[in-house]
Image (cartoon, coloured by chain):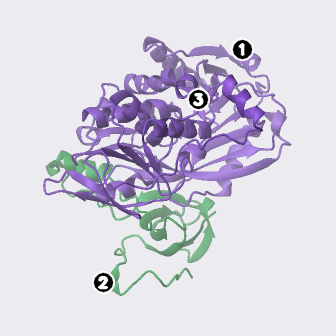
Chain colours: A green, B purple
Amino acid sequence: MLLIHCPYCSERRPEIEFGYAGEAHIARPVQPDTLSDAEWETYLFVRTNARGRHFERWRHVHGCGRFFNAVRDTVTDRFERTYKAGEPRPGEADGWTGQSGDMS
Amino acid sequence: MTRFSFATLAAKAIGHHKSWPQQWPDAAPKAAYDAVIVGAGGHGLGAAYYLARKYGITNVAVIDKGWLGGGNTGRNTTIIRSNYLYDESAFLYDHAVKLWDGLSRELNYNVMYSKRGVLMLAHNVHDVQSFKRHIHSNRLNGVDNEWLTAEEAQAYCPPLSIDPRARHPVLGAALQRRGGTARHDSVAWGYARGAAALGVDIIQNCAVTGIRRDADGAVSGLETERGFIATRKIGVSAAGNSSVVMDMAGLRFPLESFPLQALVSEPVKPFFPCVVMSNTVHAYMSQSDKGELVIGAGTDAYVSYSQRGAMHIVEHTLAAICEIFPVVRRMKMLRNWGGIVDVTPDRSPILGKTPVKGLYVNCGWGTGGFKATPGAADLLAYTIAKDEPHPINAPFNLDRFRSGRLIDEAAAAAVAH
């Protein structure tokens, strides 16, 4: 079972308290009526499905109830980091390499 | 290839079984092939076999990063059925069930297809109405499926508890008598032996690292750990790793890969005569010929390639099994494992051409690909040979996610997912 750090509760809790909510950082279209069929397909159905580092949403259903984002390696299932919803996607530009393993 | 028969068995017995030849050689990659199949599971090996036998394309390689049959082919719960709601699905899965019949004879290899019947339990009014709708739809499509009362279901499967005081009482069941099980390893081995005898190279422990395309965008070959292989036709049958392989051709797919767990009990004497599935309590069970109870359920919640899942999923599954079959409560579980299943948004597979010329795909079978093995293999071979889909797999194209013409078996709830 995964142990997941909730950035709102600042606690690492067992997976059964959480609900998985799919890939993170998929922005809802601002003007849906202007979208082409191909763009709808991408938004609704196409997923990165990364083998390796994966950005994903979780919800602390049986805790604070809030959504947050996580970076997890899908081969080892090890979490690299969790962060609050609305925060930018961690990347090289922030000087973050994903190697810190900071789960505190 | 030595043909298996009573005569050869007797002849080899005289020599103390020391002169059996290798069933298929472990081939090294050649510089070029007419077609290459990525993924040496049942689907991929079967596609190579049908390409050689039905379409005369014998200069074919099947390439795998591991050993043949070592992925989901060897990790499933071996259930075969075709009682799907929609016409497209019924035709697709029943095509496979028709091929299961006679597969052992065709391959001269015993795949142990056992038509022991698949019983799907109805636990509430919604289940009853939904299953009866399935039964009517199936029968219109020529797929056998019949309604049993709770008492009839128990007569068919005596270990089943129909106690009305149960939390989820059994109100009845849908029975597909042609459904059943097969020995999954034998399917991979049988197809491998058959394909190799027709000239197909089976290349194991050789991961594909890239797909090379020419100036027109058509595929021109595969980069592998053991060098470049030139080919104009690539069939990808890579299950949970389909997204990874398609990414090498610059394609993003509507797929997510989840761990799906299964487990077996200690072996006991035969007491469980059929396959029983329950979508409501979410578990399914059968008994293998070795005597082990083979048990499975739903996927873990999150995307993963780790080939293992969480214990609470197993606990939930076993709680459901103990509820329906109180007789197994004191049995011990022996082994538990996970496979990585590639799931589409509508829970139907993608089987056909891709936007890249010369690249064909067979993926998205999700939690139920084993039952379709011979059918998917045959249709993938047809699609590669003719460069167009067969009418049976034409609706299962990639374009349906753009056009909106989904085959929504997820909403139809014919599958335990």
The answer to whether residue B289 is above or below residue A41 is above
Q: Residue at x 53, y 54 (%)?
A: B301
From the viewer's perspective, is the residue at label 1 or at label 3 nearer? 3
- The residue that mark 2 highlights is A93
- Callout 2–callout 3 Cβ contact below 8 Å: no
Give the structural element (helix, strand or loop) at label 1.
helix
Dot 3 falls on a residue whose secondary structure is loop
Instruction: Name the residue type under label 2.
Output: Ala
Marks 2 and 3 belong to one chain: no
* Marks 1/3: CA–CA distance: 43 Å
The verdict on a common chain for dots 1 and 3 is: yes
Left or right relative to B275: residue A88: left
- Mark number displayed over residue B152: 1
- Residue B21, position in %: x, y? 61, 41
Residue wearing tag 3: B3
Asked whether B5 or B37 is in front, the reply is B5
Q: Nearer the viewer, residue B268 or B87?
A: B268
Instruction: Give the numbered dot on residue B378.
Output: none
Task: Name the chain under label 2.
Answer: A
Image quarter in which the N terminus of chain B is found? top right
Vertical comparison of A4 with B46: above or below: below
